[in-house]
């Protein structure tokens, strides 16, 4: 149980275009979702936290106008990288927790990640 | 000082060895403790979750929490090449999570 999917798993785009990444909780309701980016051989870097129906809370140094996060339902959050540039190339990972019970509030369940390459 | 400290390794062991992975933390308010395994180019996978001090065992994995010393460990018995991955510790205080930087483990056949 507690499965999170991400789509696409891999995307290549041209500089200046926008890319949308979807994160879905398949078997639980994710009241809170997190978005991370990870550079090669480095640990997770939290970008933002989003609660269903509310605006996302961004970590310091993360441009909220560049990384648009929408958490419109309890099973879906999206991250849109606007006007992507080569320096945005990275591995983006989402995770979710739910609002109740052992599985939900105590742990994060991660998606498989999306590899973004901006040419 | 970071909230969570974890030796990045790499840690290289022969197949069948007992592996010990550790994290220390500074905030005594942390309530929940987790270990994740991350294979290259994949999302982290939850391995173990603990709440209180003591040991929790699941197959070849044992998670240990010592709140008095602010120290957590993950032991892997009879390590296998398939255990080669990066292991992340994580801790939670209310709705905020803190991750270690990860220890890269290589189990040689």
Image (cartoon, rainbow, N blue to C red):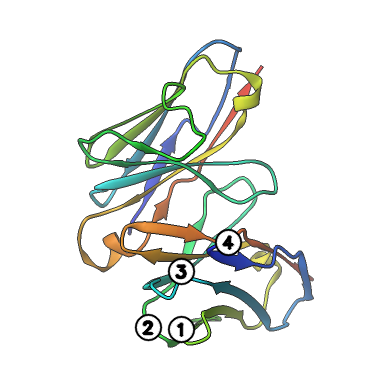
- The chain containing the residue under callout 2 comes to B
Say whether disc 2 or disc 1 marks the residue closer to the N-terminus: 2
| Residue sitting at x 42%, y 58% | B97
Give how far apart the Cα atoms at labels 3 and 2 are: 11 Å
The x, y position of residue A63, in whole percent, is 47, 27
Same chain for the residues at labels 3 and 2, yes or no? Answer: yes
Q: Which residue is mark 4?
A: B2
**Residue at image x 72%, y 81%?**
B16
Q: Earlier in the sequence, mark 1 or mark 4?
A: 4
* Res B67 label: 1
Q: Are marks 3 and 4 on the same chain?
A: yes
Total labels drawn: 4
Mark nearer the N terminus (3 vs 4): 4
Instruction: Give the letter of the chain under mark 4.
Output: B
- For mark 3, name the chain: B
Separation (CA) of disc 2 from disc 4: 22 Å
Q: Which residue is mark 2?
A: B52
Residue found at x 78% / y 75% = B13
């Amino acid at each position: 149980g507690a499965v999170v999917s991400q789509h696409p798993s891999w995307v290549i785009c041209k500089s200046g275009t926008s890319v949308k990444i979807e994160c879905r909780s398949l078997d639980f309701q994710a009241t809170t979702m997190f978005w991370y980016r990870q550079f090669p051989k480095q640990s997770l870097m939290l970008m933002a936290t989003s609660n269903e129906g509310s605006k996302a809370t961004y970590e310091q140094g993360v441009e909220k106008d560049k990384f648009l996060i929408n958490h419109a339902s309890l099973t879906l959050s999206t991250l849109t990288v606007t006007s992507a540039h080569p320096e945005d190339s990275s591995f983006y990972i989402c995770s979710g927790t739910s609002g109740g019970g052992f599985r939900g509030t105590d742990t994060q369940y991660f998606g498989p990640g999306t590899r973004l390459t901006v040419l | 000082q970071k909230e969570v400290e974890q030796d990045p390794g790499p840690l290289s062991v022969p197949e069948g060895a007992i592996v010990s992975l550790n994290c220390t933390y500074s905030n005594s308010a942390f309530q929940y403790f987790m270990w994740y395994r991350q294979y290259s180019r994949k999302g982290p996978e939850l391995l173990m979750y603990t709440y209180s001090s003591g040991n929790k065992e699941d197959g070849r994995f044992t998670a240990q929490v010592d709140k008095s010393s602010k120290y957590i460990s993950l032991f892997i018995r009879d390590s296998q090449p398939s255990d080669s991955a990066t292991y992340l510790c994580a801790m939670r205080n209310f709705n905020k999570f803190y991750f270690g930087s990860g220890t890269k483990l290589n189990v040689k056949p």
